[in-house]
Image (cartoon, grey):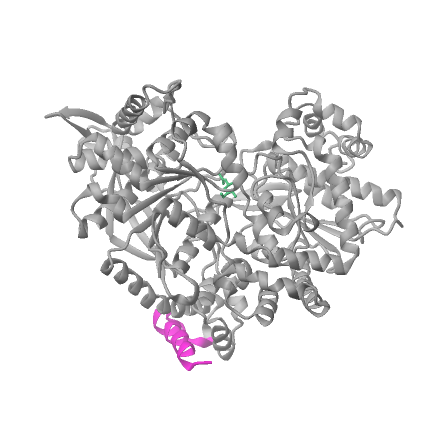
Amino acid sequence: MSESLKTDILRHLTFTIGKDAANATIYDWRMALSHAMRDRIMEPWFAATRRTWAEDRKRVYYLSMEFLIGRLLEDATINLGLHEEAVAAMAALGQDFHAVVEDEPDAALGNGGLGRLAACFMESMATLGCPAYGYGIRYEHGLFRQSFRNGEQMETAENWLDHPHPWEFPRPEARYVIPFKGQVEVRNGRSVWTPAETVLAEAHDTPVIGWQGKWANTLRLWSARPTGDFNLERFNKGDYAAAAEPEALARTLSRVLYPDDTTYQGKELRLKQEFFLTSAALQDILRRFLQSHSDLRLLSRHVAIQMNDTHPAIAGPELIRLLVDDHGMEFREAMQVAQQVLGYTNHTLLPEALERWATYTFGNVLPRHMQIVEQIDGWHLEENRRRPHYVGIVKHAEVRMGELAFITAHKVNGVSALHTELIKTNLFPELNDLHPNRIVNQTNGVTPRRWLKMCNPALSGLITDTIGSGWEADLDRLRDLEPHVEDPAFRQAFGTAKRDNKVKLAAWLERTCGVDVDPDALFDVQVKRLHEYKRQLLNILETVARWKAIHDNPNAGWVPRVKIFGGKSAPGYAVAKEIIHLINDVATVLNNDPVTSDLLKVAYPPNYNVSMAERLVPAADLSEQISTAGKEASGTGNMKFMINGAPTIGTLDGANVEILKEVSGENFFLFGLTAEEVVKRREDPEHARHAIESSQALKDVLQMIAEGRFSPDQPDRYHALVHRVWHHDYFLVASDFDSYIETQGKVDAAFTDRDRWLRMAALNTARSGFFSSDRTIRGYMTDIWDIGPAI
Ligand code: NBG
């Protein structure tokens, strides 16, 4: 251990935190260690910035309403290559590194996959040395904290900023005025927008350090403050509320993250947040460009802007506004520049998630942008006059953000092969006809630094012992494990690593939710947001069926299972909340059943987040990816489990299709209808009834739930839920039930054969190289951003 880290920690404890070691709390130690680590990021951070300027490199700007970055201390320590040293330094100071790391609150500035993907991308861009900025909002309250009361989800505010956040640097000099509402007049042939409200966006920068500390980029989050232009006139007229409005508006703008990842919020505040982020980012981008360039027509040589879903889709009109109104460019030229720099990633096909704003709301909040949107629409019509169909952005008095993003971008991408095809055929068929080369695929990935190296030291140690290091930044090298899979000693070691992780998880489950589980049972895990299309319901119905089957025949040689659930429901999503309640009710009955509880347990630890995923993923035996085919755009949890050696039980949906292709059919438990069959099945209005009537197991399960077996205090609690399965089963839980049960039987059989199981598990890891977000980012760099290989 080098003394210098220890000295630095003590120095920070003394001079930055103002504590002496004898009185320091775990928080103080965490702050001291974080500052010592942060110091070590500065040099690569400055060096990367200097080099980007010196070489006049093209920069990527990733605009996202969500960055689900989780904890940063351990990640930084690992990427700096200082993990062992930090553990030793803390030990020398009498502190447990891991306990200190766990004191850090999760920065939960996102809902689910889309936000976590943005965080993985930031890490990969830093690892690849691709100059990049992430732009987002510094929400005071990230995603809510979930707890259960009598099995029901409760929400409380998450105050991640309660304590100082050691990773960010406020940049009071980087401030921009963000305008809203008001009037647009034409003066001397130019449009002049006089906003009625303004707010200031102020930057906070967090460095993002790549693998081995070779490069660091910046995550720049905006926080809102009042402009200070207090309206004395209104105040003097006695209109105090109106006078106070800018202040109130400013405070609210960066206060909350909308806690819903799949339906769009038709709220004015949400639209304002989207514009706040986008306008601040674009003003910052243009300012940086103009520091060393003057011809804005050449913007795309130096700038690539990625819109993470349609949330920042106002970027097209806003960039055009800045170019035309502030820099005097002609509309057509501005349109061309916008298209050259903008890319749009679509993350979902669910119709309720497609953002649409009433023209009334849009025009009221952003009057100048409403004009520009109409101008874009007119231009696009003109350009495609002779084509068979025309697609408008404004339709039925709504501004359609998907169409707007598509038309203003030069590339539109889906996030898995299947999803990209469905975008072409189902979501934007006409636009795809008009612009046949615009839609491209970039299958998602996850960073192997966090999702293998950091979260699974047992397995990553074994990998390094077996094939050497280097796989962390070249995940395809995991293929070198394949020959070792035939070696019984390697399989044994693989099994031991998994078991160690399961032992740790078992202890944690006991501590956090009082469920006592056997580490040798099969750990079957479904963790993700609660949504009907993700079909946690199918999983819990199968659990009930299994419970009944064990009761009917307790000596049939059952494989002990632990069903682990995790995930939050949007607070207003009643059906999802009912499913949470049911899972918890079922857990109570099953976990207390003396006949079955050795063979089947259900655990639902509350408040699933990035840190919990880091615990669960390495300990899983089986990964549940059971969405209705055609609904999950990609999934990224599926990739994390695969990398950590958990085979998937899943449908042909999202990136499961590509996982199956990589591991091959013997190492994947495939079940259920395909996306095409799903569409056909729905044509039969009685599909659910037919499925239920032909499945005794499903009929029994529904009967038990309807009778109140799991809700004796309120027997009719799940009547509506059961009724929906019979009559409104849009996500085809009933139709896929038998296939799912049968496939779960195959899982049991495979698990009983330990050698076979370990082979499958190890092959999942060995063949997971494709799912590194480094591969994904390289794809964006060549196909969308036009940036050569970096570093
Ligand atoms: C989610 C999809 C996932 C996908 C992630 C990342 C949203 C709106 N979409 O399937 O549901 O993996 O995006 O692309 O969060």
Left or right of residue 657: residue 262: left
Residue at x 56%, y 57% (from the top left corner): 614
What quarter of the picture does the C terminus occupy? bottom left
5 in magenta: yes
- Where residue 161 appears, x then y in whole percent? 41, 53
Counting the numbered discs, the total is 0
The reply to whether residue 601 is in sight is yes
Vertical side of 789 occupied by 241: above or below: above
**Closest to the observer: 351 or 59?**
59
Q: Specify the segment rendered in magenta.
A: 1-22
Question: Residue 382, located in which quarter of the rendered image?
Answer: top left
- Where residue 475 appears, x then y in whole percent? 52, 59
Left or right of residue 719: residue 326: left
**Closest to the observer: 21 or 633?**
633
- Where residue 294 appears, x then y in whole percent? 16, 46
Question: Residue 192, located in which quarter of the rendered image?
Answer: top left
**Closest to the observer: 714 or 222?**
222
**Closest to the observer: 338 or 513?**
338
Vertical side of 176 occupied by 379: above or below: above
- Where residue 90 appears, x then y in whole percent? 49, 75
The reply to whether residue 517 is in sight is no
193 in magenta: no
Residue at x 38%, y 32% (from the top left corner): 406
Q: Main secondary structure of the magenta part?
A: helix
Left or right of residue 128: residue 180: left
